[in-house]
Image: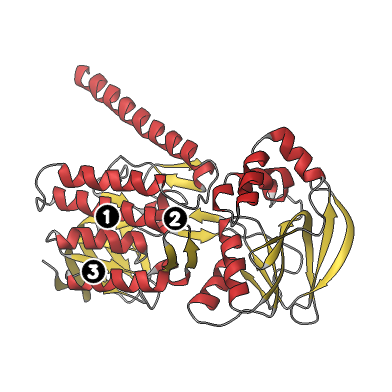
Amino acid sequence: MKSKVRTAGRAVMISDVVVIGAGPAGLSAAIAAAEAGASVVVIDENPRAGGKLLGQLHEEPGTGWWIGADISKKLAERAADAGVRILTNRQVWNLSPGWEVALDNGESVSAKYAVAATGAAERPLPIPGWSMPGVMAIGAAQTLTNYYRVRPGDRIAIVGIDPLSLTVAHELSMAGADVVGIYLPSKSVFTGSQADPDRNLEYLAGMSELAPNAFLRWGGRLAANPTLRSLALTFFPKSGIPLMGTRLNLRKSLISIGGDGRVQHIETAAIDKQGNPGKIQTVEVDCVCISGGLYPVQELTRDCELVRIDQLGGTVPLYSQELETTQDNLFVAGNVTGIEGAKIAMAQGNLAGTVIASRLGLIQGKKAIDQAAEAVRSARKSSAITFMPDIEEGRRIADDLWLKRGSENLLTQKDESYA
């Protein structure tokens, strides 16, 4: 049962479960636990529950439109109906084993179980001129357009090729913006393989089944072959190819952003197959959206055993098949475990909440947990978009490290028993 007590002048809310993050993973975890009978508090720094869902709007093959704002509203309503208390406009200052969450307003939440569903943040991609008004992260453009219904510019350039930039380019075009093109970033110590035309063509080939017509799908499958891919880059049009209201440029990089007080133009360079620049061209724009990719946010999992797995997007906590970390009773769900889509995050949240409900004695047997785990696997198999091209390899590495850790702990316990 939720309750509130005062300790040393501060209010302490007591609950069975505390969930940090009101995105798709956090809300789903809260729903699963609360509908089983647990008392749950959800904390989020934003004014409205939903997380990154609020800005998502795209058409999925065979299933119609994915409207994130509507989905987040339904999740929040379902959580409220189950008795979940959602605290918005609250920043978490500390998470300490126990589990106690300290908030910025002097309150705290104490619970036996905690779920860190803190999601992901956009990776910065420094470009000359990137601090100028009119330059923004691609996620900010998506939120402005789809949630606030504000078009970030009239003539927009996008730098960085990934599922998010491709999706937002289409959304901006539908909102009436002239998206002049999607460009590669120029070579630098920050961009790495993001500036490599071959790497990007291989990445796009992996998403060829999502292409809008049969010809492009066929071309994408051909591009999966390294020899044919090299040939394709040689003859790739220097003016780019039309794609959902804009032009995709694998043979041009955006090298700088300029203007008098705000964005007025960009400089692009024609590049060879290795990404080396050639002829420079100036293009008039009033907005530039930068997509440097996403990385998992780990501030609140710092006491867990963390590992860097680039295939998952960066540093992630080690966790079991039931999503429990190396800290007892601390679970993770969503992009904090690796960069994946919202449907997978929701399935992970449901699994974490179901496991916790079982631990609390509210669910009997393993059937519900097995079904929730299978739902995660099913969501991954049916996912229309893969944000990290080698995500399956990343998950295999994470699973192996967890199993290795368990084996080492078992050996240590045996050694101590003989001491």
Calculate the distance from the C-alpha at mark 1 to the C-alpha at mark 3.
12 Å
Q: Position of residue 291 (x, y in %)?
A: 62, 61
Q: Residues within 10 Å of mark 1 (few under 14, many from 20)?
A: many
**x 76%, y 38%: residue:** 230
Query: Residue 142: which disc?
Result: none
**x 59%, y 78%: residue:** 175
Q: Is residue 126 left or right of residue 96?
A: right
Q: Image height check: is 74 above or below 112?
A: below
State the image quarter where residue 374 is shown.
top left
**x 71%, y 75%: residue:** 132
Among the two numbered marks 2 and 3 on one chain, the one whose residue lies closer to the N terminus? 3
Q: Position of residue 134 (x, y in %)?
A: 68, 77
Calculate the distance from the C-alpha at mark 2 to the C-alpha at mark 1.
15 Å
* Amino acid at the residue labelled 1: Asn
**x 23%, y 20%: residue:** 414
Q: Image height check: is 264 above or below 345?
A: below
**Closer-to-camera residue (214/71):** 214
Secondary structure, mark 3, is helix
**Closer-to-camera residue (12/317):** 317
Q: Is residue 204 left or right of residue 106?
A: right
Identify the residue under disc 3.
79
* Amino acid at the residue labelled 3: Ala
* Amino acid at the residue labelled 2: Gly
Among the two numbered marks 2 and 1 on one chain, the one whose residue lies closer to the N terminus? 2
Q: Residues within 10 Å of mark 3 (few under 14, many from 20)?
A: many
Query: Residue 341: which disc?
Result: 2
- Position of the C terminus, as image quadrant, is top left
Query: Residue 350: which disc?
Result: 1
